[in-house]
Amino acid sequence: MLTVVKVGIAVLSALIVMALLSPLLIFLVDVITNPTSVIQLGVERVKYDVLNQSVKVVLSLYYNGSIPLINVSIEWPGGNIHFDEVSKGIYREVITIPIESLTALQDLRSLNMSFSVGGLYPVTISIGKVG
Amino acid sequence: MSAKIIDVVKKVIHGIVLGIIYYLLYGYLLPSIILGFAHVELEVLTLRLLPYLGLFVSLGIVEELLKNHPVSIPFRMLTKVMYALILMAILNGGVISTTLSIEPYIMHVRIDITLLLYMIIILSLIYGVIDSLSIVRKVTKS
């Protein structure tokens, strides 16, 4: 009887671990197979406000992964943006940022991104430009 | 006398096999799957994990030599938790970091998998309790 329980527990454990691990594995497979186009950021200038030294831009986030990302936060020198949940698709936000931070955002000189894969695995990514 | 020696040798061999099996599961297979996806080279990983093989084999031998003895009841439970904690130590407490280079950018990626490791520890503890119960039954029968 105990042997049956032990085998049952072992099988159940394997199933639970696989169920917990699968969102992360699927996300990593998406990233590895297509590293440059799973998450893409686009910046489009809309209007300069010379008086306030700011610029209005449309920031677009394109996500091509299968697992939803929760609490997506993107920070760059001079600004940040937050999305509660990001599933496959394009998300656009109109934001106003200081003119000097526009170049940093367009060139991706320094950018920090944090999100949670399927709400289970927190991930932080720091991107820096070489040279 | 010689029968006793053969019995002890058998238990030691069984313990070595048990230790290798647990090492392959907790010290190699699970970290390889998780770290392999994080682009940590397998060769580096294997060298780093080798010292754990001795620990797993030692625990396996002690577990086998103490089999059917009441002392083995808490020992069996604790070893299962210890294996899971070793897995946690190998995986840096559940925080995996890696650096990727996609010209002209350098990306530092940090993934927190503590939830998965906590689940493995809890399941190991449950398995340890079930394993100990089988010894309790044997001890009470004899």
Image (cartoon, helix red, strand yellow):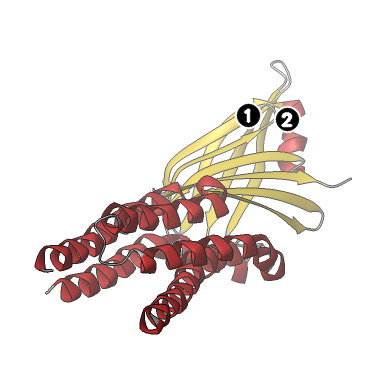
**Chain where mark 1 sits:** A
Q: Are marks 1 and 2 on the same chain?
A: yes
- Of residue A12 and residue A95, the one placed in the foreground of this image is A12
Q: Amino acid at mark 2?
A: Ser
**Vertical placement of A47 versus A92: above or below?**
above
Which residue, as the protein is rendered here, is positioned at the far right? A131
Q: Is residue A81 left or right of residue B8?
A: right
Q: Earlier in the sequence, mark 1 or mark 2?
A: 1
Element carrying mark 1? strand
**Label 2 near label 1: C-beta < 8 Å?**
yes
- Residue A10: x and y in percent read 28, 70
Q: Amino acid at mark 1?
A: Gly
Which residue, as the protein is rendered here, is positioned at the far top? A51
Numbered badge on residue A101: 2
- Of residue A67 and residue B49, the one placed in the foreground of this image is B49
**Chain where mark 2 sits:** A
Numbered badge on residue A9: none
Numbered badge on residue A79: 1
Q: Is residue A84 left or right of residue A98?
A: left
